[in-house]
Image: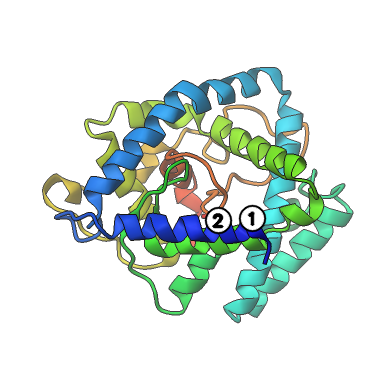
């Protein structure tokens, strides 16, 4: 194993150990004190850095180019999903993933075009967090990591495995190109979530809103009962209220210039704390699955 993945796993372990030192009254969020501090940091970084960059990216990058970028990284995520569906012994989804990757890679110019979705090969993207849940680790405590989306202990460990598995380093062989590709993917994902910012900003408690929305969506993806909080945290969240009218994509823009797949929760691909809203945008389709991804 190279030094770079080793450092990543070491840092991940230290962060999880740090989270274990915190306590909280919510059974699904026992590390609330720690998580709130990380959320405040992530939220500040997003407002001052991430969101402005995403807004600039959306303004200067033509929609067809953004769609191509989205499709390319979705194709990589399909490769990761293929591996996890094989490990979960799910032959039908694994075959669908294999066909999606084959069609989009060969006929879709390396994944820039999504040819598979119009053919009826729908996404079933899975990460290693889904694999862990499949084999019994269904309920896991809410957990946040700096610069990463909302998660759980299980999905954070899964994100580390996903990072080591997704084939970006085989395509982008230098540190510079690898880092550049990751940044482009992150900025594109954040740009797609811009229309959902008002819902989060209007919440009385952004942290609780993000946590409960994300945990509810994640439970629905896994097909398990959502965790219960305390007091007002138990109020049911109408996910449909968070979704724009054209919920197939968080951006209010036509999708005809280049075939595009429905926006997937980038449950296992890194982005900011707004991933809760990304999952919300996928709620009408969540029955398919399970993001993350990392």
Of residues 291 and 294, the one nearer the viewer is: 294
Tell me where residue 179 appears, x and y as whole percent: 68, 41
Q: Is residue 237 visible?
A: no
Q: Quadrant of residue 253?
A: top right
Q: Residues within 10 Å of mark 1 (few under 14, many from 20)?
A: few
Q: Disc 1 versus disc 2: distance between alpha carbons?
A: 6 Å
Label 1–label 2 contact, CB within 8 A: yes
Q: Which structural element holds mark 2?
A: helix
Please tell me how many numbered marks the rendered image carries.
2
> Which residue is at 79% across, 48% downward?
172
Q: Which structural element holds mark 1?
A: helix
Q: Is residue 40 above or below residue 120?
A: above
Q: Residue furthest left?
A: 231
Q: Quadrant of residue 219?
A: bottom left
Q: Is residue 282 above or below residue 141?
A: above
Q: Is residue 175 above or below residue 119?
A: above
Q: Residue furthest bottom?
A: 89
Say left or right for 217 vs 264.
left
User: Mark 1 = which residue?
Assistant: 4
Say left or right for 104 vs 13.
right
Tell me where residue 262 appears, x and y as whole percent: 62, 46
Q: Residues within 10 Å of mark 2 (few under 14, many from 20)?
A: few
């Amino acid at each position: 194993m190279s030094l770079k993945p080793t450092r990543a796993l070491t840092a991940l372990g230290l962060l999880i150990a740090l989270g274990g030192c915190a306590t909280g009254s919510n059974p699904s969020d026992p590390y609330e004190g720690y998580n709130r501090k990380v959320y405040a940091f992530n939220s500040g970084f997003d407002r001052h850095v991430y969101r402005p960059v995403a807004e600039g990216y959306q303004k200067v990058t033509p929609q067809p180019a953004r769609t191509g970028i989205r499709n390319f990284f979705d194709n990589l995520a399909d490769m990761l999903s293929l591996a996890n569906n094989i490990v979960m012994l799910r032959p039908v989804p694994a075959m669908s993933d294999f066909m999606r990757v084959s069609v989009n890679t060969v006929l879709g110019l390396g994944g820039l075009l999504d040819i598979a979705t119009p053919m009826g090969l729908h996404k079933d993207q899975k990460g290693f967090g889904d694999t862990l849940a499949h084999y019994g680790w269904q309920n896991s405590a809410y957990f946040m990591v700096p610069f990463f989306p909302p998660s759980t202990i299980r999905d954070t460990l899964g994100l580390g495995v996903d990072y080591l598995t997704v084939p970006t380093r085989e395509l982008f062989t230098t540190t510079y190109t690898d880092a550049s590709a990751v940044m482009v993917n992150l900025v594109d994902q954040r740009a797609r979530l811009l229309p959902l910012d008002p819902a989060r900003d209007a919440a009385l408690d952004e942290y609780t809103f993000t946590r409960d929305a994300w945990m509810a969506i994640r439970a629905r993806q896994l097909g398990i009962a959502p965790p219960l909080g305390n007091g007002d945290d138990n109020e049911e969240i109408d996910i449909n209220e968070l979704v724009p009218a054209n919920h197939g994509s968080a951006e209010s823009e036509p999708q005809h210039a280049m075939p595009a797949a429905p926006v997937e929760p980038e449950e296992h691909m890194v982005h900011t704390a707004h991933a809760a809203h990304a999952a919300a945008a996928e709620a009408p389709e969540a029955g398919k699955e399970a993001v993350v991804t990392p």
